[in-house]
Image (spheres, rainbow, N blue to C red):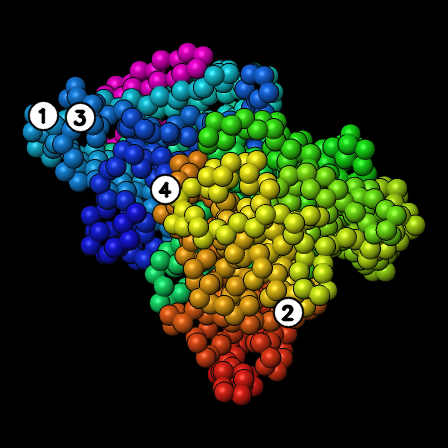
């Protein structure tokens, strides 16, 4: 990735009618030239999306290693092969175009490349491309393109392509193909005619109804292709698995041919007549026009960036990584659809088949809670809609309450594959779907954090309370009160997936204890403040006073593996007896430790895959003594191999909160390069959405020191020494905050209703009033008293 961004680069960017004429280079990701081997990762990084759809950043004409795909959120299909699990259905490549110039295909493999540049504009959420080539006959052709997935209208996809013949008379054949994979077919082409409208001879409509033939999976798409200035001849060929549309345009030397495409996507079962909705929607989009539609899209992004953009002066690489991450998180969530969630690789790649993990609630959700609570609410409502599947999974396994799927798709049923092939070719049985049960506590924890930060009573009444109560009910049945008087949870897999089928994993048990306590607290809260709602919910769940009273008792006798002498939590029963392996002997390391040593060998060591006890320190920070946090981080940090992209950011966060900014810097860098540097070698499968969310948390909760307790918020800044300024917007209940920090100065502006209780480290608490700016400075004696600025 070219990081030497400049205004001059943007001046060479595409100049379609809708392309912006100015931009700030700090908001641009630029890929210069063309490297075939990197194409898959570039397609992930340069993806566009709006939470309803996500499209990889593939070249219009493709390449030998292109993997174009568009994913429609929540639309899954199951391949007709033994042992297959549901996977996101792949929408055809709506951006793909075969361009034939005077009989010769325009592509990078058959022409001399004069210039090539792709630009992802993070602020405006548009992907632009500039290509200039010369063919064997000396003809020079220039291609500019722009595409966007509208945030103002989540059913709408937009594309603009401009082809210019610099030194010859142009005959341009444009061929677009909607091609569907195995098992997917075109059910019908509903429009009565696909010829152009006599009133608009340059407008070519096409609508398709697509299905996998054996489920409700599917979608309807309606496109409108509009060549400007020059008319064209059109031909459409239709089969079960492919629809090809051809246009021929003829123009003179130096002429520019411009095409606009308006693509409307509606899915089943969200709409009773998705086809008609798609057709009407596409027609309406054409009537509005490309430029106004893009303007509305950019306007929505301006609003989102106002609540999300973190600014760091003194660290350009981290600044870029944070904007890249926020861009992809915003692109992945849809507050308008609470029946979908964000897959592990968002809507940017095929990895993990589009399944939803704990990644969403623990790593991504805090970003939305504090920048766009509407999206956070929708993501949690997905878990409420899939609660019936979690209840059934628990019942089938002999437990009560909700046992959420480790991997979830549209229905919430368990879709974890039963087998996996390792990079060395070893076939392993996958136990995560049965044993990695901590996800049920993780989801309850996310619901509790959302309530804490938003006080959204509607969510609590209609979904949040039930999620937390059914989680507590599950944990009261999942373990066993044994003869030692302690509550044990056996046969689990913790976040450290190198060690399977262990007893009393500290993270699992600590989170289970949290869920049991919160279940009892939520019941008490509803009973005291909203007794009618509590009685209704308790009756529906058949939840008795005696059952609730047991939860707190079990949480108090939960086995956590804590040793009061060493202040350490034993990661699981028997962990301390494992063989110690010094990870430094494998440095520099470019391969995962379980690949180097083998799966069976790693199981016998104390090597930890990712933050496990360290993750518990982060999530339960306020419940642990400072000495306990310090001791456990120092013990487990050198034993952690970071075999997962989820791990570095959490270590950065905890290191920062402990005041170890040098170590925090190291982990921030490692986390920020996972996608932009492809340091794990698998960005081709999509961006690492949890790592992105973790990086945001490490910056905000770690370096910014943001935390909350009761009805007050606190900042304990630990800025890196090279940062000259750090600012961030935050949402907290009915307030919007803009926080700006320098090494010894802290400014706070507040808007909203009523005063906000704020403290910086051990400074005096202030009740910050709306529409005022406050400042405090760090003196040798500590933080000064606040003063209001005029």
Mark sitting earlier along the chain (2/3):
3
The single residue placed furthest to the top in the displayed view is 239
457 left or right of 281 in image: right
Mark sitting earlier along the chain (3/4):
4
In 3D space, how far apart are the residues under numbered discs 2 and 3 (Cα atoms)?
64 Å
Q: Secondary structure at mark 1?
A: loop
Circle number at residue 626? 2
Mark sitting earlier along the chain (2/4):
4
In 3D space, how far apart are the residues under numbered discs 3 and 4 (Cα atoms)?
24 Å
In 3D space, how far apart are the residues under numbered discs 2 and 4 (Cα atoms)?
42 Å
* Quadrant of the image occupied by residue 713: bottom right
Residue located beneath label 1 in the image: 136
151 and 215: which is toward the camera: 215
In 3D space, how far apart are the residues under numbered discs 1 and 4 (Cα atoms)?
31 Å
Q: What residue is shown at x 21% (from left), y 30% (from top)?
A: 108
- Residue 655: x and y in percent read 52, 63
Circle number at residue 46? 4
Q: Which residues are magenta?
A: 224-252
- Residue 435: x and y in percent read 68, 37
In 3D space, how far apart are the residues under numbered discs 2 and 1 (Cα atoms)?
70 Å
Structural crowding at the residue carrying mark 1, measured as other residues with C-alpha within 10 Å and reported as few (<14), some (14–19) or many (≥20)? few
């Amino acid at each position: 990735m070219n990081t030497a961004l400049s205004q001059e680069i943007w001046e060479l960017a595409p100049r379609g009618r809708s392309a912006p004429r100015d931009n700030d280079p700090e908001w641009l990701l630029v890929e210069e030239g063309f490297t075939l081997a990197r194409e898959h990762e570039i397609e992930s990084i340069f993806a566009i999306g709006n939470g309803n759809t996500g499209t990889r950043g593939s070249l219009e004409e493709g390449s030998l290693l292109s993997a174009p795909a568009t994913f429609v959120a929540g639309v899954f299909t199951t391949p007709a092969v033994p042992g297959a699990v549901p996977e996101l259905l792949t929408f055809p490549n709506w951006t793909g175009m075969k361009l034939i110039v005077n009989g010769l295909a325009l592509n990078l493999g058959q022409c001399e490349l004069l210039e090539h540049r792709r630009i992802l504009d993070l602020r405006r959420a548009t992907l632009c491309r500039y290509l200039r080539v010369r063919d064997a006959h000396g003809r020079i052709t220039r291609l500019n393109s722009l595409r966007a997935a509208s945030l103002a209208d989540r059913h709408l996809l937009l594309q603009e392509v401009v082809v210019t013949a610099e030194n010859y008379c142009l005959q341009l054949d444009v061929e677009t193909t909607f091609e569907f994979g195995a098992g997917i077919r075109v059910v019908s082409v509903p429009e009565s005619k696909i010829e152009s409208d006599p009133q608009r001879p340059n407008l070519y409509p096409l609508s398709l109804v697509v299905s996998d033939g054996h489920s409700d999976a599917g979608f309807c798409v309606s496109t409108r292709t509009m060549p400007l200035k020059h008319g064209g001849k059109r031909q459409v060929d239709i089969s079960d698995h492919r629809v090809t549309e051809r246009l021929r345009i003829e123009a003179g030397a130096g002429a520019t041919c411009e095409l606009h495409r308006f693509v409307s996507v509606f899915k089943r079962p969200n709409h009773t007549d998705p086809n008609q909705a798609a057709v009407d929607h596409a027609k309406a989009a054409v009537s509005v026009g490309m430029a106004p539609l893009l303007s509305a899209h950019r306007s929505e992004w301006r609003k989102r960036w106002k609540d999300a953009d973190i600014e760091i002066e003194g660290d350009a690489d981290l600044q870029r990584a944070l904007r890249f991450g926020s861009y992809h998180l915003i692109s992945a969530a849809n507050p308008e659809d609470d029946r979908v969630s964000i897959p592990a690789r968002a809507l940017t790649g095929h990895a993990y088949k589009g399944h939803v993990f704990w990644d969403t609630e623990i790593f991504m959700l805090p970003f939305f809670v504090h920048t766009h609570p509407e999206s956070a609410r929708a993501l949690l409502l997905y878990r409420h809609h899939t609660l019936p599947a979690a209840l059934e999974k628990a019942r089938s396994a002999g437990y009560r309450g909700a046992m959420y799927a480790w991997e979830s798709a549209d229905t919430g049923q368990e879709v974890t594959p039963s087998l996996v092939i390792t990079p060395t070719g070893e076939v392993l049985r996958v136990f995560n779907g049965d044993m990695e049960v901590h996800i049920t506590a993780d989801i309850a924890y996310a619901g509790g954090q959302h309530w804490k930060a938003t006080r959204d009573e509607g969510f609590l009444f209609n979904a949040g309370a039930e999620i937390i109560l059914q989680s507590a009910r599950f944990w009261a049945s999942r373990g066993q009160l044994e003869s030692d008087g302690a509550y044990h949870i056996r046969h689990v897999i913790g976040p450290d997936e190198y060690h399977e089928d262990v007893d009393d994993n500290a993270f699992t048990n600590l989170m289970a204890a949290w869920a049991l306590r919160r279940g009892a607290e939520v019941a008490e809260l509803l009973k005291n403040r909203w007794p009618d709602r509590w009685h209704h919910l308790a009756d529906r769940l058949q939840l008795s006073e005696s059952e609730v009273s047991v939860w707190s008792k079990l949480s108090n006798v939960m086995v956590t593996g804590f040793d009061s002498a060493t202040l350490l939590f034993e990661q699981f029963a028997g962990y301390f007896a494992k063989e110690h392996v010094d990870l430094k002997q494998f440095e520099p390391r470019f391969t995962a430790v379980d690949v180097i040593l083998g799966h069976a060998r790693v199981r016998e060591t104390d090597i930890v895959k990712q933050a496990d006890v360290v993750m518990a320190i982060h999530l339960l920070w306020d419940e642990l003594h400072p000495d306990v946090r310090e001791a456990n981080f120092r013990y487990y940090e050198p034993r952690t191999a970071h075999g997962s992209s989820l791990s570095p950011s959490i270590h950065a966060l905890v290191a920062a909160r402990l005041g170890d900014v040098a170590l925090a810097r190291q982990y921030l860098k490692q986390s920020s390069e996972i996608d932009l540097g492809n340091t794990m070698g698998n960005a081709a499968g999509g961006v690492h959405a949890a790592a992105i969310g973790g990086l945001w948390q490490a910056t905000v909760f770690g370096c910014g020191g943001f935390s909350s307790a009761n009805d007050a918020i606190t900042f304990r800044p630990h800025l890196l020494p090279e940062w000259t300024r750090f600012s961030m917007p935050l949402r907290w209940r009915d307030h919007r905050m803009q926080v700006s920090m320098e090494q010894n100065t802290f400014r706070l502006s507040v808007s909203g209703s009523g005063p906000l209780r704020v403290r910086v480290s051990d400074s005096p608490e202030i009740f910050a009033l709306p529409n005022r700016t406050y400042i405090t400075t760090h003196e040798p004696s500590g933080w000064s008293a606040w003063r209001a600025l005029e």
